[in-house]
Image: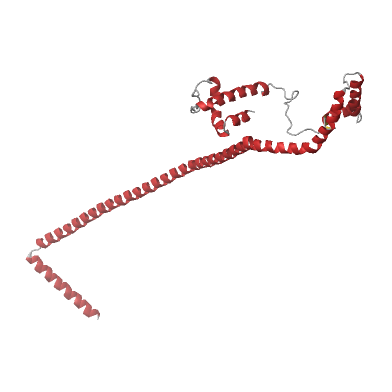
Amino acid sequence: MLSRLALKSGSVGRFCGLQRCLPQITARPSSSTPAVGGDKPLPVLPQHQAMIEDMVRWTQANEVFYGKDRDTVNFPILKMSPEKPKMRFLVIPQEWFDALYTRTGVTGPYLLTYGLAATLVSKEIFIVDHVFADLMMLTPPVLLATYFWGPKVGTWFQKRIDVKNNLIYEKPIADTKASCTKQMAKLETAKEALDATKDFVHAQKEYVLLQLEASYRERLNKVYTEVKKRLDFKMEVQNAQRRFEQEHMVNWITSNVVKSITPKEEEKSIADCIATLKKISQVQSATA
């Protein structure tokens, strides 16, 4: 019933959009702006104010008559059937016969019908006068017209009712369901994208960490190379200094030794060398 009221008052989209304002407008129906709650306040347009007030009243009425205190087991909610129930003799409902079958048998409803009619006539509760003749003349044509043309007329009216229901209720509700389904699909896609964004952020962090690790290793290798170069240079300097010291020491010793030899010692040394060579040559010739 509330959905029908919303459809009569406006489109289903406006009803769904204003549904969030309903609890807040209940407390302050005259305010143009809902009270500030957990959600963002929604402005209420003047043309929607009357519809919201009707929605509030219908909600309160539904809580009273169809709320949780309603005993639907012992007092079920009656619903009008969209189709005509089965009839006997075109005027008596079939369910009356079904209710009497368990108590009176198959012939009970017929005896009750004719017996009641006979009782009404015999007790002059139903008086047979000149109007009764008119009634007897009018009843068969009405029953025959109902029997032959009633279904066609009912079908014609039912088609118009179906078109009206489809235009006012079913089509807006179907469009709203399709729109809601589409919006839910978009929200699911957005939710999946949001969930994937978390993994993307994590992967991006891992990628940045890998870049930092690569940069750290590159700089560490560069530091190692530069330190090795400096150590090699230091070692080469020390080796060059050591070689220079050794060469200088050898040259200094050699020059001092040469300077310390006198001409006499030199002549004596040369003479000793010549004598030694002669001895060696004599030994070699003797062995040969």
Q: What is the x, y in percent for residue 173? A: 61, 36
* Position of 169 relative to 51 (above/below): below
For the N terminus, the image quarter is: top right
Single out the residue that lies furthest toward the left.
263
| Colouring | secondary structure
* Viewer-side residue, 1 vs 223: 1
* Position of 148 relative to 31 (above/below): below
Q: Report the side of 86 relative to 38 (left or right).
A: right
Q: What is the x, y in percent for residue 104? A: 91, 27
Q: What is the x, y in percent for residue 192? A: 53, 42
Q: Residue at x 60, y 38 (%)?
A: 177
Q: Report the side of 3 relative to 237 (left or right).
A: right
Q: Does the image show residue 99? A: no
Q: Residue at x 56, y 34 (%)?
A: 13
Single out the residue that lies furthest toward the bottom.
288
How many numbered dots are placed on residues in this image? 0
* Viewer-side residue, 140 vs 186: 140
Q: Quadrant of residue 258?
A: bottom left
Q: Residue at x 66, y 38 (%)?
A: 163
For the C terminus, the image quarter is: bottom left
* Position of 217 relative to 78 (above/below): below
Single out the residue that lies furthest toward the front.
130
Q: Does the image show residue 114? A: yes
* Viewer-side residue, 150 vs 111: 150
Q: What is the x, y in percent for residue 164? A: 65, 36
Q: Residue at x 25, y 53 (%)?
A: 233
Q: Report the side of 83 relative to 163 (left or right).
A: right
* Viewer-side residue, 280 vs 63: 63
